Image (tube, grey):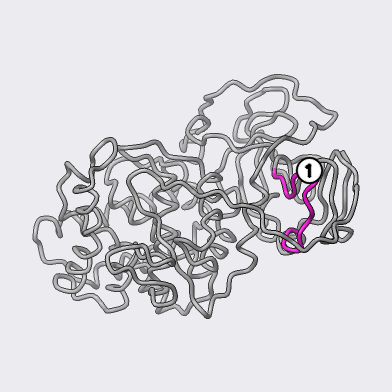
Amino acid sequence: MNLVKTSDLRPGQIFSEPVYSEGEHMLVPARIPVRQKDIDFLVNWNIDSVLTQGELVTISVEPEQERPEEELPEPDNFEMTAPQDDLLQPIHEDFLMDIFSVDSSPSEPEEEPVSEIKGPVNFSISDVQQNTGPYRAYKNLIEKVAAIFTGIKSGVDVEMRVINNIGMQLLQDLRDYPESFVDYILGGEVTGHELAKSSVNTAILSALTAQELKLKNHKINNIVAGALLHDVGMLRLSKGITEKKGQLSEAELEQIKSHPVHTSKIVTKELFGSQEINLIALQHHERWDGKGYPDQIIGPSIDLGARIVSVADAFEAMVSKKSYRKSIVGYQAVKNLLADNGRRFDPAVIMAFTKIMGIYPIGSILKLNDGSIARVDRLNIEAPLRPIIQILINKDGKTLRPGERPTIDLLSDKKLFIKNALDTHEYS
């Protein structure tokens, strides 16, 4: 395997074999010219070298051509939304997903795994202890929101200040336990109160994204409140539709698409919420390309808070188990968002979301090139493909107890790299 420094790459270079940025993440296929945007990606994400089994064979003098993009399939039974803002310019969003296209894998390092890991293995949240402050705080938020939703569904008067207070508590808890909360979202450990849990999860992810975008505190407060309420209109739909297993009919899908309007009515006429919160409720399923609902708003006309909530909502929906489909791993959910290419989502919001979540979100279960199994412990923001990990099963196949698990910074240890992400639920 040949190592090529990023600083030595030039547009138009052609290699005889695929070039990989990390592990199985292909940057450039064999005999396809390197593009400036490929080099820009490596620089922006602090990747100082790439690997290839081939050799530099030529330098193309032809003008750069775009590689064909694969159409991202729609997830089952939920709409993913889109957007963008003049103030939030995307950074190379059109090539972020090129590294995920894999035709073949680089050769394994000299050290082969000693044994094959057999899953599932139990690494439940009891490892992190359900009696800890972070877990109690997370569960308490869900229970409070569930109580609010029960009151709204029953016709009990609910004041907007109660929602705002829950939002402020969420932001305080998030300052105290940011990594734990993301871990709980991916782990799906809390069962019951599904609508409330989804709303809290979306609010957590929206808050983190808004903070990454450095929005003002009052704006973040409104976004959190809007995220907590964004799907409350689902309470006006029948359980036969919201909990249906399998594909929705056209008529049922139209009813689902009415929930933003129901939410808007609840926010404005029952809770007397602000216009900013109402716009989040009403527009979080609008798309950047104008093909969303309910009003087919296009581009910068979509409220920024709604754009943030739409990304958080889509990610939460993908990683959460639903009655009509299984969840997918956090890595695949991030990959799907990055592949959107400005159809549904604001690319600048996607960039901010990726920075706070990482390519491999905290709590993701990974297989390394030496055969060991690890959990993502912390992110390296400037090097998203090389997080800080904790070894759960070593390369000899030994399951490690909590006190025995070494922590490794993949940015420092260049011999190790991520081979692939695993299903969290098989190892959690």
Horizontal and vertical percent position of residue 192? 28, 42
Q: Which residue is mark 1?
A: 30
Amino acid type shown at disc 1: Ala
For the residue pair 185 and 288, the one nearer the viewer reads as 288
At x 36%, y 37%, the residue is: 325
Horizontal and vertical percent position of residue 389? 66, 44
At x 39%, y 77%, the residue is: 301
Mark 1: secondary structure: loop
The image quadrant where one finds the N terminus is top right
Q: Left or right of 358: which side holds 178?
A: left
Q: Left or right of 241: which side holds 38?
A: right
Residue 97 in the image: above or below residue 175: above
For the residue pair 163 and 381, the one nearer the viewer reads as 381
Q: Which residues are magenta?
A: 25-38
At x 65%, y 34%, the residue is: 367
Direction front: furthest residue: 62
- Is residue 171 among the parts visible in the rendering? no
Horizontal and vertical percent position of residue 284? 35, 64
Whether the magenta-drawn stretch holds residue 262 is answered as: no
Q: Examine the image and state in which quarter residue 113 appears.
A: top right
Total numbered labels placed on residues in the image:
1
Graded by Cα atoms within 10 Å as few (under 14), some (14 to 19) or many (20 or more), the crowding at tag 1 reads some
Q: Left or right of 315: which side holds 79?
A: left
For the residue pair 243 and 140, the one nearer the viewer reads as 243
At x 42%, y 73%, the residue is: 304
Horizontal and vertical percent position of residue 335? 56, 49
